[in-house]
Image (cartoon, rainbow, N blue to C red):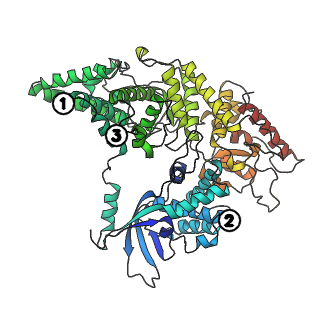
């Protein structure tokens, strides 16, 4: 390696050394991380530090070091009056910016003391984007003018602050432990490219580089090494590869001529076991071996055309989880008696026993993988790229035999009304936990599906049974959070509902689902019917709203003393981080005007709050009575009363 292409392992403390500056060049995109990425980063560091933040997870041993990835930089030279080393950031700016915002939160909390913060500096700036530089500097210095110039940066700070509070990391001891580990034990590789590098070309290569070998590919190889012969290995590989594309219905990832052999004419048959798939797969291979050259050419042309048509149509779907994490869900469902962490950082370890053998047999596991993928495909929501108004799809694969088209159709899984209810409650679960790991709701939903379906009946479930169990699951999660406590607000004991930004996303989303269900049934909620809310109801969809909005602001814009019970649930709703940054210090009337002018509301609770004419802090005033009244109605709904 050239001496110019230097690789250094830096602690986070060393990364933020005051003698080094980093500049994000103009060709880089704006800061774009949201709650899923930020929360995942904090969770990963918490796990490495041995801090538990999930109810269903066990504490893991503290790691000596946690590798965070790489930061690719270019050293700028010949700068006028240069007093420190200046690096241009080529790759890694999203992570570096987020670490900078985390550092600002550390400074804001003042948990480490000035001695441990010495020689640390917010050393990241942005070329030609002074607003971003000022926004980062403002949060580091604790300056707030009520409306950030760069909402995404302020929103990231709010996400960090809230996540620490919700997960219990804001307790002084845990915050101190987290940040000491962050500064001293979290490491990043700084890679400096040679000075003659064409940066535009290098940046293009970095953004188009090939994928590295992933952990699930290593796991696949370990499984295949235990199989007896090539026929079994080829069949295992075909099933595994078909299941690995989470954005495509599993059957569609099998070659078209094998698809009907394995899954039947309607593509809905689930094979009885691995050997049943092996028989079909081996038969197909033998048949191909016996084909003439002309038959091979004709078959290849036909398959290529049909597969291309299918892929083009299927680009509409996304996924709520990636393949590595899905593998852990399957293992946890197969081994309920064991402690299986739903965290793909531990993927290989989860499958390897103490004697270095696999915890599950290869053929058994890959069959269960196929079964759960078919359940996932049919009964778990997917992001719909073609329909932004609906956002989430709950549709099944249909062979579309009644048309001349070779590509499938995607009808609703259940009757329209039932399908909509199940779609909504699944979306409610998903947006409450946007990160890929620790998706407890998904594991519980797959368990419900497994209990209520059989391969003999092609994994068909009664939709009403599914909905009832999902609603019971929601009730169970809510009871775990509230732990049977009195939810009414009191000055002596505010409780879990009245914690301001510390109220969990799930509580707000569960409430919106229950409000939506009542309005859909023609009932009124807090004096409002579906027709009164107009588009706020008819176009309502669950999305990743992660910021708690105080409808009457935490800081009174007039300079008067703050509302005494500003954190009570009646005054709260869940909105997007960008809206929260923009409107946080507006009076309720100003917020209502903004949303009315834009003809939208971000949640059903918020839409109902905005229906009130008066909303304010005076204990004897009508505005405060409205807050109390609204809160009582919302608690009744949360309790299903």
Q: Based on the displayed image, in which of its 4 quarters is residue 506 positioned?
A: top right
Question: What secondary structure is found at the residue carrying circle 3?
Answer: helix
Position of residue 445 measured from the top left corner of the image (x, y, whole percent): 53, 29
| Cα distance in 3D space between marks 2 and 1 | 65 Å
Q: Is residue 588 left or right of residue 183?
A: right
Residue furthest bottom as drawn: 81
- Choose top left, top right, bottom left or bottom right for residue 270: top left
Q: Are marks 2 and 3 in contact (CB under 8 Å)?
A: no
Closer to the camera, 59 or 503?
Answer: 59
Mark 1 surroundings: few (<14), some (14-19) or many (≥20) residues within 10 A:
few
Report the residue at 72% width, 55% height from top: 586
N-terminal-most mark, 2 or 1? 2
Kindly identify which residue carries mark 1: 300
In the orientation shown, which residue stands out farthest toward the right?
A: 620
Say which quadrant the N terminus sits in. Answer: bottom left
Q: Earlier in the sequence, mark 1 or mark 3?
A: 3
Give how far apart the Cα atoms at labels 1 and 3 are: 31 Å
Q: For mark 2, does the 10 Å Cα neighbourhood hold few (<14), some (14 to 19), or many (20 or more) residues?
A: few
Q: Position of residue 49 (x, y in %)?
A: 53, 54
Q: Which residue is mark 3?
A: 219
Name the residue at the front extreme. Answer: 355
Q: Which residue is mark 2?
A: 145
């Amino acid at each position: 390696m050239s001496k110019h292409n230097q690789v250094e392992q830096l602690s986070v403390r060393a990364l933020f050394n005051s003698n080094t500056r980093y500049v994000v060049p103009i060709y880089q995109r704006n800061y774009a991380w949201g709650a899923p990425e930020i929360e995942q980063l904090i969770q990963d560091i918490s796990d490495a530090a041995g801090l538990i933040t999930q109810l269903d997870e066990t504490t893991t041993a503290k790691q000596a070091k946690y590798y965070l990835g790489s930061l690719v930089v270019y050293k700028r030279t010949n700068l006028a009056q240069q007093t420190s080393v200046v690096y241009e950031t080529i790759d890694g700016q999203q992570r570096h910016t987020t670490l900078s915002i985390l550092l600002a939160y550390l400074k804001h909390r003042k948990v480490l003391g000035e001695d441990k913060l010495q020689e640390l500096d917010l050393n990241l700036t942005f070329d030609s984007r002074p607003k971003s530089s000022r926004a980062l500097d403002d949060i580091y210095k604790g300056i707030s003018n009520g409306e950030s110039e760069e909402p995404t940066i302020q929103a990231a700070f709010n996400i960090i602050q809230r996540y620490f509070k919700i997960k219990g990391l804001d307790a002084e001891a845990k915050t101190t432990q987290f940040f000491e580990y962050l500064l001293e034990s979290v490491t990043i590789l700084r890679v400096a490219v040679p000075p003659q590098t064409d940066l535009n070309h290098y940046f293009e290569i970095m953004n188009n580089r090939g994928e590295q070998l992933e952990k699930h590919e290593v796991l696949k190889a370990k499984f295949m090494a235990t199989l007896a012969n090539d026929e079994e290995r080829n069949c295992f590989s075909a099933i595994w590869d078909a299941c690995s594309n989470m954005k495509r219905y599993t059957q569609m990832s099998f070659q078209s001529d094998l698809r009907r052999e394995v899954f039947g004419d309607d593509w809905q048959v689930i094979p009885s076991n691995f050997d049943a798939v092996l028989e079909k797969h081996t038969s197909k291979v033998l048949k191909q071996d016996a084909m003439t050259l002309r038959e091979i050419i004709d078959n290849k042309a036909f398959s290529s055309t049909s597969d291309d048509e299918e892929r083009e149509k299927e680009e509409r779907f996304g996924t709520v989880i990636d393949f590595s994490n899905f593998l852990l869900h399957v293992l946890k469902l197969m081994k309920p008696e064991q402690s299986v962490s739903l965290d793909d950082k531990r993927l290989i370890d989860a499958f390897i026993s103490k004697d270095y053998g696999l915890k599950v047999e290869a053929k058994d596991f890959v069959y269960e993988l196929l079964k759960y993928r078919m359940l996932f495909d049919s009964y778990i929501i997917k992001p719909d790229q073609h329909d932004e108004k609906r956002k989430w799809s709950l549709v099944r694969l249909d062979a579309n035999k009644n048309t001349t088209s070779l590509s499938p159709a995607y009808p609703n899984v259940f009757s329209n009304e039932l399908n909509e209810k199940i779609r909504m409650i699944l979306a409610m679960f998903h947006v409450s936990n946007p990160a890929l790991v620790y998706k407890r709701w998904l594991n519980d939903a797959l368990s419900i599906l497994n209990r209520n379906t059989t391969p003999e009946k092609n994994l068909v479930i009664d939709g009403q049974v599914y909905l009832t169990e999902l609603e019971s699951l929601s009730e169970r999660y809510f009871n775990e959070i509230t732990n049977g406590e009195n939810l009414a607000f009191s000055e002596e004991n505010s409780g879990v509902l009245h914690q301001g930004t510390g109220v969990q996303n799930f509580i707000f989303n569960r409430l919106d689902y229950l409000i939506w269900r009542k309005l859909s049934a023609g009932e009124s909620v807090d004096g409002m019917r579906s027709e009164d809310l107009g588009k706020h109801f008819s176009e309502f969809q669950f999305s990743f709203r992660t910021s708690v909005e105080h409808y009457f602001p935490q800081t009174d814009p007039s300079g008067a003393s703050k509302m005494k019970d500003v954190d009570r649930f009646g005054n709260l709703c869940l909105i997007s981080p960008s809206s929260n940054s923009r409107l946080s210090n507006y009076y309720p009337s100003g917020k209502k005007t903004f949303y009315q002018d834009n003809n939208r509301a971000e949640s059903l609770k918020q839409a109902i709050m905005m229906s009130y004419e008066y909303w304010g802090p005076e204990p004897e005033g009508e505005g405060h009575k409205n807050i109390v009244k609204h809160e009582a109605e919302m608690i009744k709904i949360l309790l299903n009363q």
